[in-house]
Image (spheres, rainbow, N blue to C red):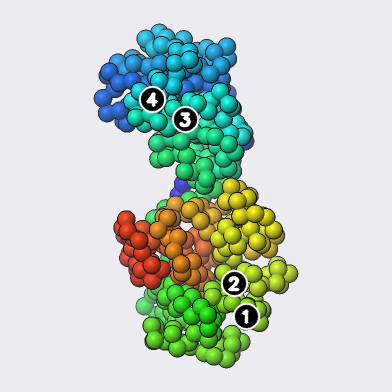
Amino acid sequence: MRTAYSVETVRNAERELMARLPEGALMQRAAAGLAAACADLLGRVYGSRVVLLVGSGDNGGDALYAGARLARRGAGVTAVLLAPERAHAGGLAALRRAGGRVAGTGRAEALVEGADVVLDGIVGIGAKGGLRPDAVPLAAAAARSRGAVVAVDLPSGVDADTGEVHGEAVRADLTVTFGTHKPGLLIDPAREYAGSVRLVDIGLELPAEPELEALQHDDVARLLPVPRAESDKYRRGVVGIAAGSARYPGAAVLAVSGALRGGAGAVRYVGPAGDAVIARFPETLVSDQGPKHAGRVQAWVVGPGAGDDAATVAEVLAADVPVLIDADGLRLADSEVVRGRRAPTLMTPHAGEAAALLGVDRAEVEGGRLAAVRELARRYGATVLLKGSTTLVADSGGGAVRVNPTGTGWLATAGSGDVLSGLGGSLLAAGLSAVDAGSAGAYLHGLAGRLAADGAPVGAHDVAEAVPEAWRNVLG
């Protein structure tokens, strides 16, 4: 599992470690890892051209010491100092001793554009807001550079704690981060600026509970339900799907398709699209008597394609089993009823739906995804899965927010969310907690999207059909 910690937590851990180490040892550890990552990118260090964009903080010091190491290996290293009077003195002296040069900002853009590697050490993880005006031309030149842009700890101009980007920021091909991931490296929009991320261990001792968690294959494999010899459909779980309408029967079909591949033992469907569901999936147990009379279920999914059927949404929310609410169900659900539920509730909005629930513009949600998912979870007393390029899962009780690493832009297709709803609901019925069902469901869904697309457009039904392959891939 990858974890990310807040700036305050990282700073505290750094102070504790520096108190036990010789002066400057921690920065040397970081610089060594940074130089090694640059050397790997270059392949041949000798004769290469490296440009350092150096601000006044420790990030600038890391860049200068890493540049000194590369200069000693034969690279031509030039430092552009954005604040010469406040540059890290020890790092600057080390660079000059190794044969590195210092250039004025007047010809910096040409140097950056011609470099093989550009190190972004403009500002560190404590900075807020976008780049200062004097740094913006250098970031633009780095974007035009033919070489690789390497961010030191975090791309300059992005918010380390929130993943927000206010104004201009450096776009990196690689970010070399120290000690632990920072939330902004895992959450969009900042994640888009980070490129690939390489973690350098510098010996930090961090708390047990992080700010963010990103599950990996092994983590998801431990969560997935596996039937035993004595299992029957009820032991495996039965999920109810209350979805679809005369206008949107396909939503019901897609939600059922996800549910059938989600590990539960059986799927019950309730709604007006029964004929369409049976025609596609004859193993589905169909009822037209409403959720109360559908038979035994261990979890419900409600809302995909529901139109204005508020009565069905209310009936499902009254059930004393876990409920996943999606799509129209989010709009139709009574917030007080959701907050008053005793059984787990998992809400799965996309950014537009989240914005409507919060009463803000969609852009505010997309620009501050971490704040939005936490606020929704708090406000509704529910687990919230905020869909998007980086899907986030937050629990109302606080704790670490889960971020899904498997998403792909190919999943931005009609009906994809309906498949995810069915999949997540099936995992709820199989006994997973709301946080685990949302996290594992998003992970499988994203992986299925990647496998189904393989670089080409796909439909939601293709994603559903790829879930078994994703499941096998996770289990190894």
Q: Amino acid at mark 4?
A: Glu
Q: Earlier in the sequence, mark 2 or mark 4?
A: 4
Sooner in the amino-acid sequence: mark 3 or mark 1: 3
Taking depth in this image into account, of 447 and 132 the one nearest to the observer is 132
Q: Secondary structure at mark 4?
A: helix
Residue 323: percent from the left, percent from the top? 59, 73
Q: Which residue is mark 4?
A: 113
Disc on the earlier residue, 3 or 2:
3
What type is the residue that disc 3 sits on? Ala
| Mark sitting on residue 328 | 2
Instruction: Check residue 140 in the rendering and tell me which mark sits there, or answer none.
Output: 3
Helix, strand or loop for disc 2: helix
Q: Earlier in the sequence, mark 2 or mark 1?
A: 1
Whether residues under marks 3 and 1 lie with C-beta atoms below 8 angstroms apart, the answer is no
Q: Which residue is mark 1?
A: 309
Q: Secondary structure at mark 1?
A: loop
